[in-house]
Amino acid sequence: MIRVQYIGHSGFLVEMEQIYLLFDYDKGELPEFIQEKKLFIFVSHKHQDHYNREIWKLKNHDREVCFVLSKDVPFSAKQRELLGILEEDCKSVVQVRANECYFLEDRKGESIRIDTLKSTDLGVAFLVSYKGYKIYHAGDLNRWVWKGESEVWNRDMAERYTIQLKKLQERLKTDKVTIAFLPLDPRQEEEAFEGICEFLEKISVEKVFPMHLWENYGLIEQCIQVVTSRLSKKEADKIIRITRMGQEWKNEHCL
């Protein structure tokens, strides 16, 4: 069983039989969590549209919670004091760096593998492997090409994005990404579709959830048209149409 809920902006909740994966919570309404399922909370970097300090209120000693934080997220003694994080809470915090591999466990001792990639902006992207599923959340790893930047800067950005996709290919080997959460930012104008197009060209994936849309959900239809004309309808059909915060998809809808 797998269920995906769009929380808002780049925030998604993935629910499986034994665990929850909450990625980059910024804003939006969270559901009631089943106590028996372990909750893993991922923060790809410290930008406020990816990291809401309210996540620390989710720590609950009646439920197992694990925080997976990019190393750039402030976690000094002073920060912990301000956030009300006790010394015993630190045991449930994993600080991660780019291009590393980490192993965690669900409540039954089943392995959860987390591979990280280096963002083209700040922090990391996550590839979570669990019971045959591969869940990829890009954070701000994207082909950030902008009209106002120099040709040299944009070329370097495009190359750095390609390098990270190659590393993702190496991590996957012959496996397929089950679900990918990928930036689709309207501020990039016509360049907005390039990151998803390149991802679909190079990475085998079942379903793609666009994010970082700044609530411009109409951009998804444009992206689908671009992918259809440039790649194929088969690839375009992998893109999920998000229309509102709180929207949910279950097995039969997204896998």
Image: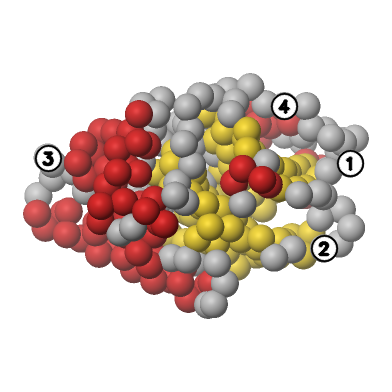
Q: Earlier in the sequence, mark 4 or mark 2?
A: 4
Image mark for residue 36: 1
Q: Are marks 1 and 2 in contact (CB under 8 Å)?
A: no
SS for tag 3? Answer: loop
Image mark for residue 110: 2
Three-letter amino acid code at the position of disc 4: Pro
Three-letter amino acid code at the position of disc 2: Glu
Alpha-carbon distance for marks 4 and 3?
40 Å
* Residue 244 shown left or right of residue 14 in the figure: left
Q: Earlier in the sequence, mark 1 or mark 4?
A: 4
Q: Earlier in the sequence, mark 1 or mark 3?
A: 1
Q: Residues within 10 Å of mark 4 (few under 14, many from 20)?
A: few
Query: Residue 125: image x %, image y %?
Result: 49, 54
Q: Which residue is mark 4?
A: 31
Query: Residue 206: image x %, image y %?
Result: 53, 57
* Residue 227 shown left or right of residue 32 in the figure: left
Mark whose residue sits in front, 4 or 3:
4
Q: Earlier in the sequence, mark 3 or mark 2?
A: 2
